[in-house]
């Protein structure tokens, strides 16, 4: 999670919401990293998780990320939760819960929907206070400057 927090901090340099992640292989080695880049790229799909999934799939040469773990600072949204299911990621570890848009247990629970053909293991709340503080500080600064 500390590596994901480092990525989140880098996102703030481009005015992006500070969400960062790392995607690990089955041995715990980092396959890819991601951080929000919607503002930097003008791409609404440039969430940290999607960028990390794309990079890991390219590195592996396959869209199937069986055995992999995605570690992210904020509970994934519906788009990212769907991408995690489609990529067959084995485990999702997240920091702060997202009561407004979280799709891994808070608002929705996309990844554990029994109607889907793949359901990753979920571990939430890892370094939640630290992950949440980074987001609260970012949005407080946005309100002060806007």
Image (cartoon, rainbow, N blue to C red):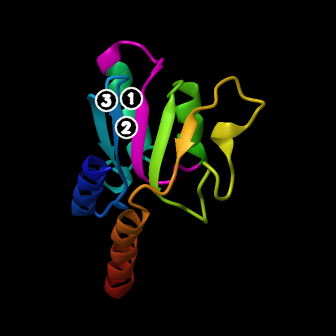
Position of 107 relative to 25 (above/below): below
Q: Which residues are magenta?
A: 59-77
Sequence-wise, the earlier of marks 3 and 1 is: 3
Please state the horizontal and vertical placement of residue 20, each as a whole percent of the image.
Answer: 34, 50
Distance in Å between CA atoms under marks 3 and 2? 19 Å
Number of dots carrying numbers: 3
Picture disc at residue 51: 2
- State yes or no: residue 74 in magenta: yes
Find disc 1 in the rendering and name its residue: 54
Comparing marks 3 and 1, which lies closer to the viewer? 3
Check disc 2: other Cα within 10 Å, few if <14, some if 14-19, many if 20+.
many
Find disc 3 in the rendering and name its residue: 28
Q: Secondary structure at mark 3?
A: loop
Q: Are marks 3 and 1 in contact (CB under 8 Å)?
A: no
Position of 21 relative to 83 (above/below): below
Which quadrant would residue 68 be assigned to in this image? Answer: top left
Q: Secondary structure at mark 2?
A: helix
């Amino acid at each position: 999670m500390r590596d994901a927090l480092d990525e989140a901090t880098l996102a703030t340099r481009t005015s992006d919401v500070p969400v960062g992640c790392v995607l690990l292989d089955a041995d715990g080695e980092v396959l890819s990293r991601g951080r929000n880049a919607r503002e930097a790229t003008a791409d609404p799909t440039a969430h940290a998780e999607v960028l990390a999934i794309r990079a890991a799939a390219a590195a592996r040469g396959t869209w199937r990320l069986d055995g992999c773990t995605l570690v992210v600072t904020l509970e994934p949204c519906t788009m990212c939760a769907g991408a995690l299911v489609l990529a067959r990621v084995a485990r999702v570890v997240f920091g702060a819960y997202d009561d407004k848009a979280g799709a891994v247990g808070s608002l929705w629970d996309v990844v554990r929907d029994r109607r889907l053909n793949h359901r990753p293991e979920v571990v939430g709340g890892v370094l939640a206070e630290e992950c949440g503080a980074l987001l609260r500080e970012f949005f407080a600064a946005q309100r002060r400057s806007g």
